[in-house]
Structures are given as C-alpha cells and as structure tokens.
Amino acid sequence: MKLLFERSRPGRGSDLLPPCDVPVTELPGELCRESAPHLPEISEVDLSRHYTELAKQTHGVNDGFYPLGSCTMKYNPRIDEEMAALPGFTNLHPLQSPDTVQGALQVLHTAEQALCEITGMHAMTFQPAAGAHGEYTGLLLIRKYHRSRGDTARTKILVPDSAHGTNPASATMAGFTVVHVPSNAHGGVDLDALREVAGPDTAGLMLTNPNTVGLFDPNILEITQIVHNAGGLCYYDGANLNAVMGHVRPGDMGFDCVHINLHKTFATPHGGGGPGSGPVGCKAFLADFLPAPRVVERDGVYAFETPAHTMGQVRSFYGNFLVVVKALTYILRLGKEGIPEASAGAVLNANYLMKKLADRYTMSFDTLCMHEFVMSLEPQSHAIGVTAMDIAKRLLDFGIHPPTMYFPLIVHEALMVEPTETESPETLDEAAEIFLKILDEAEQDPESLHAAPHHTAIGRPDEVAAARNPVLRYTEL
Ligand SMILES: *Cc1c(COP(=O)(O)O)cnc(C)c1O
C-alpha cells in the first residue's frame, strides 16, 4: 500500500485548527527552523482511508480471537477509554502544582492501594513504562537494599529456565549476573538445583507464577524460603497475574517486590508499542528505596514525597498516568467479586480449549493449566514436516491470531495459547474446530501449509530480513 508521503499533493490538507484565543507573538529568530518540515499534505478523506487500509493489513482484538500466550490480549471495556479521555485528565500538565491536581493524585493513590491489596504489597510506584522497565526498577530496589546493608557480595540473580526473556535481560541491565535454574519434570522449579545455586552471592530470584508454561508452582513457599534463607530477595514477575488475581497474592507467596503489567491484566490495550505501564510494588522494608516522587495522603490532602533513600527517577514525572486511570476504572468496575471472577474465567477458558485439543495436539505437560497452555508440534514436525510456524500462519486464514510461537524455549515446536476470560464458549468452540481442521489439512497436504497464510493482506514476510534490516524511515525515491 502507498505511504502518506506518496499520497501527498502540494496544497492539499485538512487542518481544522481552532481560532487563536491568545495574543500572537513573533517567535525569536534563533528558535525558528530554516526550512519547512517535510510533512505529507493530504485531504481528510484520504487520510481516513489510509489508516483504515493500514488497520486491515493486520489482526487486532477487534478482528477476532487473539490467543497470543504470555500477553493477555483481552478485550478491554470501552468505559476505561472513556474515563481516560475525560478532559479533566487529558488537559493536565505534569508541572501543575499539587493543589490544582488533587483528583489526579487521588487516582494514583487509590490505584496504589487497590493494586497493593491485590498483590499483597505495601507501597508502589507507577513510573515504569512497561513490564521490562518494572523488572529493571525492581532489581534496582534489590540492589539498593543489599548495598544499604553494606553487602556488596550479592551479584547474582537466579532465573528459572522457563522465564520470559526480559527477566535475564533486565537482570543484566541492572548489573547482575544471571544464574539459570532448571525446571523439574512437572514444569516447576527444580528445588535441589535451586538449593545448590542459592548462597551468599545471591541477590535475589526472579519468578513468574504461574510460569510461562501456564503452570502454578505448588512449591512456591519452599522456593521463596530457600532464597530468603540464603539472604536473597524474591522478585515476582506479575505479567501472568491475570490467572491468579483475587485468589492468591505474590506477597503471601513470599515475594518482596513485584511488577504488574497494567497493559496485560488491567485493561489497557497493548501491542504496537504502548503506552503501557509496569508499576512496581514492594514490601514496607523496601519502600524507602522506591523512585521519587510518590503520592502520599495526609488528612485528605494529597502531596508528593521523596522516599528517604530513593533510587531517583526511572522515568519522567509519574509514568503513563492515563493508563493508571484505565486500570483504576477496570478495578472499581469489577470490584472485589469481579476481579477473582475474571481470573477464574481465564483459567476455565484455557482448560476448556486445552481439553478440546488434547486428543490431537501434544500438550507439553499433562495436567490442568492456569490461564494458558503450551502444546508441542514436535511429533508433526518429525512425521510430516509441519511445524508450529505452519500451523500458526494457517490460523490467520481463519481470522485467528497466531498463538505465541517457539516460546518458552524449553518446549520444542511450541505453540502457547492464552484464550483470556473475555472469550465466549462459542468462540472457543469455533477456534477448537479450526485448530483441529488445520491438523487434518496438515496430514492430507502438508505442502499447502508451508505456504500459508493464503488469504491475508500480507503472506509470509521474510522475518530474518525484517529483523536484520528494518526499514523504519521513509526515504524519498
Ligand atoms: C510480557 C511479559 C514481560 C514483559 O513485559 P513488557 O510490558 O512487554 O515489557 C515480562 N514477563 C512476562 C512473563 C511477560 O509475559
């Protein structure tokens, strides 16, 4: 399709600026640019068609089933967007004085209380812009804590081999060395291996529970105890909180700090680069190290405060504030009953779909799952040469977004499916039929699957070339 720059014609445009209601002042010459910016000139209808065409090239939650595992691509209620669009929120400036933005501070404070209650933490920062950024912030908390006690020998972070790739990456970014902990035959942490690596050089453990194969580790209390006994802290990657919110709390599992992905669990659409939000919560003994500023309430008045031994700022101002507005709307609308119902629905839907597929697809673990499950196409790839990639691509022809592919790394030819609680039984039934039909096709005509998808706007892009030589900028031909 054509780019806006290619559709541009001199003199066309669609600027509808409101009349100026302030005195006009000349800009100082040194602030003015020397030549006009190169912007496309395009009429409103062509602009509108351009974005509609662009949207049709891809698949979103509003197009159909989107079971992308480890991502929680759920439908988010429109009321959350409406609240975040209120002019009282959108017209704020982050440098306004606190007495003019008491409502916004109350939103941050109330959201902090609700999320602390859900996670079993005592204090929280909303500065981190996404999950990985939250991990980085949480690891700095751990580092600050050890250093504050004069303990500089703790340089290692333990990470299970099933972990999300951001975990080892964040630990490295925060200056730690990563030690991998193997999984046991049930997909959980191997306790003996953990005991072996936990010691005086352990700064902490990073863990997500349920983990990235969709299993809740029943040994979680023993795991956090082993790390605590060794003098380390426990960090909870809350990206999979959608499976357990309202049922069990990371704080009660023995974790000292957590991040939550508001854009996965709490009603901000994600994909396409954001904005997201990865608030970090911690137990009281770590609160003094949190990023500044924090919102505190005294006698009904909200104010900013700098924690005594703060790590400083990890992002400008207070993070992506409007994402917090959406999260708070979502939480208040669901309430104490609705939050656990949502996660129960997510777990039910995942098990329902898994059961429907389990006769024909090989499940990586033969047990009930949480909010997602992982199947392996290894048998098919050996027998008929049809891979997880082929199945994933063919699903697009039926209006289903591919599951997560080739992750986690501990399962070969993995497809990781997360239906989410917002899907109806009818959608899951239809999806199951399609998954099974594609397997029939694979057996009858494996060749045809290698070329799938056949009916989408874009076929199979060269993913290696796209990653190695990305063209991110328009250059005039
Ligand atoms: C998505 C995810 C992350 C990273 O979160 P981002 O917001 O994408 O940075 C970390 N851990 C797990 C388990 C995840 O699923």
Image (cartoon, rainbow, N blue to C red):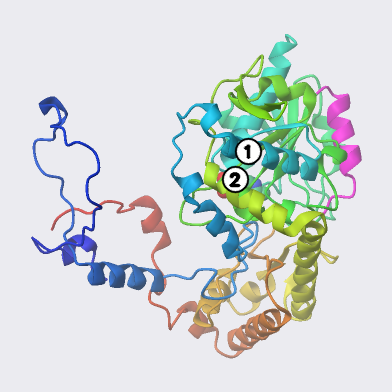
The amino acid sitting under disc 1 is Leu
Q: Is residue 406 above or below residue 19?
A: below
Callout 1: helix, strand or loop?
A: helix
SS state under label 2? helix
What residue is shown with label 1? Answer: 108
- Residue appearing at x 87%, y 43% in the figure: 220
Q: Is residue 228 magenta?
A: yes
Looking at the rendered structure, which numbered label has been put on residue 18?
none
Boundaries of the magenta span: 216-231
The residue drawn where x is 70% and y is 58% is: 333
Name the residue: 13% across, 35% down: 33
Q: Position of residue 47 (x, y in %)?
A: 26, 67
Pick the residue in front: 74 or 362: 74
- Is residue 420 placed above or below 467 in the rendered structure? below
Q: Position of residue 455 (x, y in %)?
A: 43, 83
Residue 315 at x, y percent in the picture: 50, 31
Q: CA distance from mark 1 to mark 2?
A: 7 Å
- Could you classify mark 2 by the number of other residues whose Cα lies within 10 Å: few (under 14), some (14-19), or many (20 or more)? many
Q: Give the left or right position of residue 462, taking residue 116 as reference.
A: left
Left or right relative to 156: residue 31: left
Q: Which residue is mark 2?
A: 324
Q: Is residue 153 visible?
A: no
Cβ atoms at labels 1 and 2 below 8 Å apart = yes
